[in-house]
Amino acid sequence: MKNIIVIGGGVVGLAIALELSESGVQVINAFPRAGDALSASRAAGAMLGAFGELSADDGPEEMAEFDFRLAAQRYYPAWLARLRELSGTRVSQVKGTVIIANNTGARDRDGIRRMHEEAMLRGEPAEWIEPSDVPGLKPAPVHAPSLCLYLKNEHSVDSGELLDAMIAALAKRDNYQHLDTTVIAVKPDGQSWAAKLADGRTVTADAVILANGSRSLDCLDPSLIDDAALPAVSFGKGVSCLVSGAPAVAHTIRTPNRTFACGIHVVPRTASGLLYVGATNFTGIDEDAEQKVQPGELHGLFDEAIHQINTEIRTSRIEQIRVGFRPIATFKRPLVGKTRVANLYIATGTYRNGVLMAPLVAAMIAAELGLRSAPYEGNPFSVLSEQNKTGWEMDRLLDVGVRDLVAFLQDPRSPLPYNRASELEAYVRALLKAAVSNDAGGDALHAMIQSRLKEAPFNETVHKLFYEIGDSVRMPAREAAQA
Ligand SMILES: Cc1cc2nc3c(=O)[nH]c(=O)nc-3n(C[C@H](O)[C@H](O)[C@H](O)COP(=O)(O)OP(=O)(O)OC[C@H]3O[C@@H](n4cnc5c(N)ncnc54)[C@H](O)[C@@H]3O)c2cc1C
C-alpha cells in the first residue's frame, strides 16, 4: 500500500493520519478547517475516562467496551509523550478525576460503587475521599455529595491543544498532505479509490479510511454502504462551555453517567485558566437543524454545574459555547477496521469516548492495514464480525431506555417524591413493552385497560391504572424473586 486517503480532521482522523504517516505511507488527509466549528473533538472535555464512564448496570457488552477503554487509557501516556516530542507543542494534561455521587442522580451511588469495585478488580487506584477535601467542590448544601471517589489515573487533556499538536506534527511530515476541503464522494476506481472533492478536484489512492465522525457515511453511495455492511451512523449533539473567573479546580470533577449523557462535569484548562463545563447529549439525525444552541441546553448545563459542583460558577463569564456531534452507530458499538469492501476502512462511532479511544483505534487501523503489529488483542468493534450486527435484546433496550428517560424527565433538579421514579419506570416500561411486543403480553394489557374503562370514567381512575399497569411488569419480577 503506497498511499491512503484519510477523511476527517477530528481526533480520530488526525490520530490515524499520524499513525499511518509514521509507518512511511503517503497520507492524504481531507477535512475542511472550517469543520472544526462543529467537530465533536473541539467540543470535548477530553476526559480520558475508563472507569468514570461505567454505569451500575453495565452488562457484558458494555464491559467489552470498558476493557478497550481501559487499554486505551493505559496506552495514552506513551502516545502523548511521543506527540509532544513530534509536535514540539504543549498539550496540557490534568491529572486525576473526582467522581461525585449526590441525591440528584437517581443511580449515582450505585454507579460510583461499581467504579470502585471494577478499579479494585483491575488493580487501579481508587480512593474514597471527603467532599471537603476536593479542591473546587462547593455545591449548594442540598446537593452535597454523599460519596466522592478519587481516580488517580483518570486524566484529561486539553482537546484544542491536542488537535493543534497533531496538526503541527503532521505538518512536519513529507509524506503527509492536508486537503482543506470536504470530500463529496468516494468510490472504487479500478484497483484504486477515487475521492471527489468539494473544490472540484479528484484524488486517488490505494485505500480509503472513513474517519469523518457523524458524517462518516455521507461520502458513500447507498449501494456501497450495503456492500460494506455498514450500520447507520447518527449523532449525539453535545453542548459545552468554557468560562473564565471560575473557582479553582485541581482535578476533573464529574458525576457518573446520567440521562443519556456523561453526567455534569468540570475540567480545568490549565494553560488558559478557563474552566470547561460539560456536557449535554441529545441524539439526532439532522445536523443542520441542530447546529444552534437552545437556551434549555445551557440552562440544564449550568443549573447542574452551579448547584452540584460549585455555586460560584454562577458569577463566572462564558467565554465560549461549543457544539459537537458525537458519532454513534446503530447498536452503539464503535465501528473500527476493514469493511466488506476491499480497501475501504472505517473508524467512527466512538460516541462519548473518542478522545480517549482515538490513539488505540488509530493503531488498530494501522495494524489491519499491515503497517504495524496489533496493539490490542482482537477487534471488539470489527464491522466484519457477525456478533456486532445484532443489537441488545428488546428487554434490555427497554430497561436502559426507560431508566434514562425517567431520569431525564427529572432533570435538571426536580427529583420525584417517594419512589415515584421507579413507579413511573414500571408504568412507561409496561406501555412501551406492549407497544413493541408481538406476543400476547400487549393484548393482555390492552384487554385490562379496556375493562377498566368500562368500570369507571377514565379521568377518575387513571391514577389506579398507573399502578395497575406498573404492577403488571413489577409482579412477574417479584414472583420470580420469591420463587
Ligand atoms: C460536548 C462533548 C463532550 C465530549 N467529551 C468527551 C470526553 O470527555 N472524552 C472523550 O473521550 N470523548 C468525549 N467526547 C466524544 C468525542 O469528542 C468524540 O467521540 C470524538 O471527538 C469523535 O471524533 P471524530 O474525529 O470521529 O469526529 P469529529 O471530531 O466530529 O470530527 C469529524 C471531522 O470530519 C470532518 N468531516 C466531516 N465530513 C467531512 C467530509 N465529507 N469530508 C471531509 N471531512 C469531513 C469534520 O470537518 C471534522 O474534521 C465528547 C463529545 C462532545 C460533543
Image (spheres, rainbow, N blue to C red):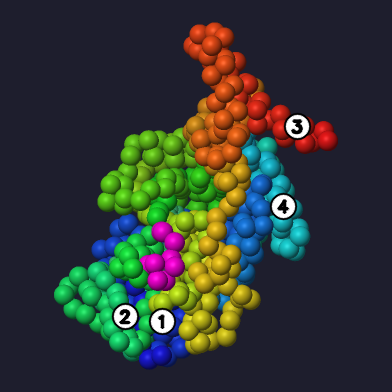
The alpha-carbon separation of the residues under discs 2 and 3 comes to: 57 Å
**Residue 478 numbered tag:** 3
Nearer the viewer's eye, disc 3 or disc 4? 3
Closer to the observer: label 4 or label 1?
1
Mark 2–mark 4 distance (CA, rounded to whole Å): 49 Å
Q: Which of 476 and 238 is in front in this view?
A: 476
Residue at which label 1 appears: 343
Q: Which amino acid does label 3 sit on?
A: Arg
Residue labelled 3 has its Cβ within 8 Å of some atom of ligand 1: no
Residue 119: mark in rendering: none
In the image, what residue type sits under mark 4?
Answer: His
The residues bearing labels 3 and 1 have C-alpha atoms spaced at a distance of 53 Å
Can you tell me which quadrant of the image ligand 1 is in? Answer: bottom left
Residue 130 appears left or right of 290: right
Q: How far apart are marks 3 and 4 (CA)?
A: 29 Å
Mark 3, residues whose alpha carbon is within 10 Å: few (<14), some, or many (≥20)?
A: few
Residue at label 2? 188
| Residue occupied by mark 4 | 116
Left or right position of 119 against 10 = right
